[in-house]
Amino acid sequence: MATRREGDPREDAPGTDRDPGTGRPGRSVPAATVGRLPGYLRALAVLTERGVVTTSSGALAQVAGVSPAQLRKDLSFLGTHGRRGVGYDVAHLSAELGAVLGLTRERRVVIVGVGNLGRALAGYPGFSDRGFVVAGLVDADPAVVGSRVAGLVVEPPDRLAAVVEEQAATIAVIATPADAAQDVCDKLVAAGVSGVLSFAPRALRVPPEVDLRAVDLGSELQILAFHDRRRAGEDG
Amino acid sequence: MATRREGDPREDAPGTDRDPGTGRPGRSVPAATVGRLPGYLRALAVLTERGVVTTSSGALAQVAGVSPAQLRKDLSFLGTHGRRGVGYDVAHLSAELGAVLGLTRERRVVIVGVGNLGRALAGYPGFSDRGFVVAGLVDADPAVVGSRVAGLVVEPPDRLAAVVEEQAATIAVIATPADAAQDVCDKLVAAGVSGVLSFAPRALRVPPEVDLRAVDLGSELQILAFHDRRRAGEDG
DNA sequence: TAGATTGTTAATCGATTAACAATC
DNA sequence: TAGATTGTTAATCGATTAACAATC
């Protein structure tokens, strides 16, 4: 969370918080809101495809799977303006959200770990669809290094920092086994990436200025199993 | 959220809420807590491997990447008991968490959509490691149907309900393109699965008794891009 | 003007953190 | 007993929902 000076936790007026990463003044968008923005952008793409020109918070929220109140609240953090009594212009709002989410510039991604999952991610159309370019692949297995995957030659671990730099990658994906993940992560951070998406089933530590997101596929199923147990009436 | 009768939202004492799925009385565990339990189980496995017999909330929280206070609070919802002044028995706590997360019984999983991602998931070791059995695969592509993937023959879409039933699957994974996902999801729900893990980049609707979790890989990168923009000092 | 819909405020709810009495 | 550590309560914080005045 944003650093606050002691003594007066309410020193800044709402909406003028300091950005935790840069210290520069910036609009503070709640984490929960940021997490829903990509969904809104997708929903707008669906409406565009349907030829819808103007929409309302009710209609857009329906497609996005949230409540109209939540959608309006979320958009309000972006200072985005619909028109009262009218609604939102689909093309305009798409452009605004795209800008907020950085679609105006290509983001370059390095994937470390080229097993089955890493391979699937390297060719995942959902990445390129949204403006991400998989620009480098790294793996520790000598049998994999040098092979061509998704049009790229897989590089060895000692080339990791060089690949990040040469490719100007700012985002990294970790798809290695759990026990290699922290070491890989440390090296990626040292190489200067600003964000890491990890699929390794373990907790990773990153410095506060680096953004970490972790997806643990096994945990997702375990969470479903928790509810499955209850539904099946198993005791415990 | 749990259904509540009108007139008195505080009719049940805390901790005696009705289970939303079954209506039976059950200990209510907050969703945020459930989401962290798999991480605690993983952390305990790490300690076990290190030969640790007894641990403290501080040590375990460190490995799991949370605060000691949060760990203790979370465990308190399970009625789990450590010993004051001593700590937690690693083996005992592992067993308790395993039971809560349903590791005492095998969970059978059907994967719909056998593209690159579905294929990677079919062979993902993190599933079998945690007691999940991938018991069926379904795909709409005639070129894929009938082929063998991860030891299973891929079945056609019209066999979906039959596969769920024959394999006694209670959990489904959707790895289809976005436009097929809702239809597949409806059929899985009709076939009786209790939980769905979707990788399709769109909002899905399920009835309240079915548990839905959605992982959108493209959105994950977009969320990282949001922070990357700010760190890079791009305006917008 | 009348109807529709936003943007925002206030109320509610849930989750996290801090502190400490209980107790091993 | 003295020291350690839990389980729980209270305080804080953040997120969601509801309601409505502003305004197109």
Image (cartoon, coloured by chain):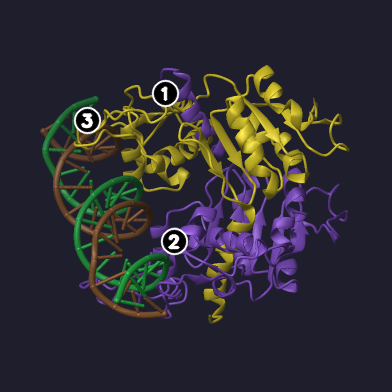
Chain colours: A purple, B yellow, C green, D brown
Q: Distance between the residues labelled 1 and 3?
A: 31 Å
Image coordinates of residue B44 in percent, x first then y, are: 48, 34
Residue annotated with mark 3:
B12
Image position of B50 with respect to B234: above or below = above
**Residue type beneath disc 2:** Leu
The local secondary structure at tag 3 comes to loop
For label 3, count other residues whose C-alpha is less than 10 Å away and answer few (under 14), some (14-19) or many (20+).
Answer: few
Residue A12 in view of the camera: no
Tell me the mark number nearer the camera, choosing from 2 and 1.
Answer: 2
Q: Mark 3 lies on which chain?
A: B
Where residue B31 sits in the image (x, y, percent)? 40, 40
Callouts 2 and 3 close, C-beta under 8 Å: no
Tag 2 and tag 1, C-beta contact below 8 Å: no
Is residue B156 among what the camera can see?
yes
Residue closer to the observer: B234 or B167: B167
Secondary structure beneath label 1: helix
Name the kind of residue labelled 1 in the image: His
* Residue name at image x 52 percent, y 75 percent: B230
Task: Give the CA distance from mark 2 to mark 1.
Answer: 45 Å
* Residue hosting label 1: B92
Q: Are both tags, 2 and 3, on one chain?
A: no
Nearer to us: label 2 or label 3:
2
Q: On the image, which quarter does residue B156 sit in?
A: top right
